[in-house]
Image (cartoon, grey):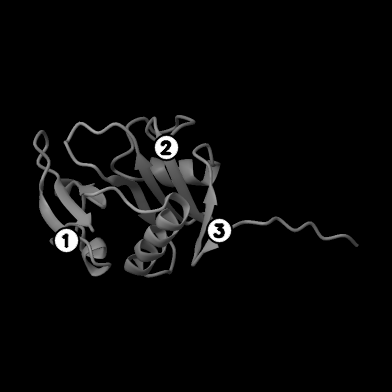
Amino acid sequence: MTQIMIDFRQYGPWIVTHKGDRACRYLADRHYSRQTPGSNQFCRPGENLVLRTAPGDALWVTWSGIRDDGLQAWECTHFRNESNHLSSDMIRAAVTATIEKWGVPPKDGLITYVDASKIKSTNPGCCFKAAGWRHIGESKRRGLTLLQLK
């Protein structure tokens, strides 16, 4: 019997996939930031690093593109964890994967925005903060919590 082996690069619980990955689309559909649930694409235009767990129960997307906030940063545009892995550990592993794939981050590092009105936590971005990210402000238009890792 022949066994097929697929060579996936793995970063902790993460494997690199693509922005059309079906399991990732389903996870993105359940995330509050998803603009068009059900569409085939869930990533912004530009360069995207899409990570998922093998069972498809967690998603991470790092985005690099033209920014309108004045920051020179890569942005985590999606993070959804429905797995048993600790979210802060998964964030650290996703950052490691991003740096290994893309190299040295831009001068403002990595950022993410959290909509405190769409989550249950009284500490918006708690899992990011536990992974070493810090609160550096709010977005100008919508007042989203802005977190950064430098």
Corner quadrant of residue 130: bottom left
* SS of the residue under disc 3: loop
Quadrant where the image shows the N terminus: bottom right
Quadrant where the image shows the C terminus: bottom left
Please state which of residues 97 and 5 is positioned toward the viewer in this rendering. Answer: 97
Labels 2 and 1: the sequence-earlier one: 2
Residue at 31% x, 46% y is: 74
Report which residue position mark 3 lands on. 55
* SS of the residue under disc 1: strand
In 3D space, how far apart are the residues under numbered discs 2 and 1 (Cα atoms)?
24 Å
**Dot 2 amino acid type:** Glu
Q: Is residue 75 left or right of residue 45?
A: left
**Dot 3 amino acid type:** Pro
**Dot 1 amino acid type:** Arg
Labels 2 and 3: the sequence-earlier one: 2
Closer to us: mark 2 or mark 3?
A: 2
Pointer 3 local density, CA inside 10 Å: few below 14, some 14–19, many at least 20:
few
Q: How many marks?
A: 3
Q: x%, y% of residue 58? A: 44, 56
Report which residue position mark 1 lands on. 134
Pointer 1 local density, CA inside 10 Å: few below 14, some 14–19, many at least 20:
some
Is mark 1 in CB contact (under 8 Å) with mark 3?
no
Report which residue position mark 2 lands on. 47
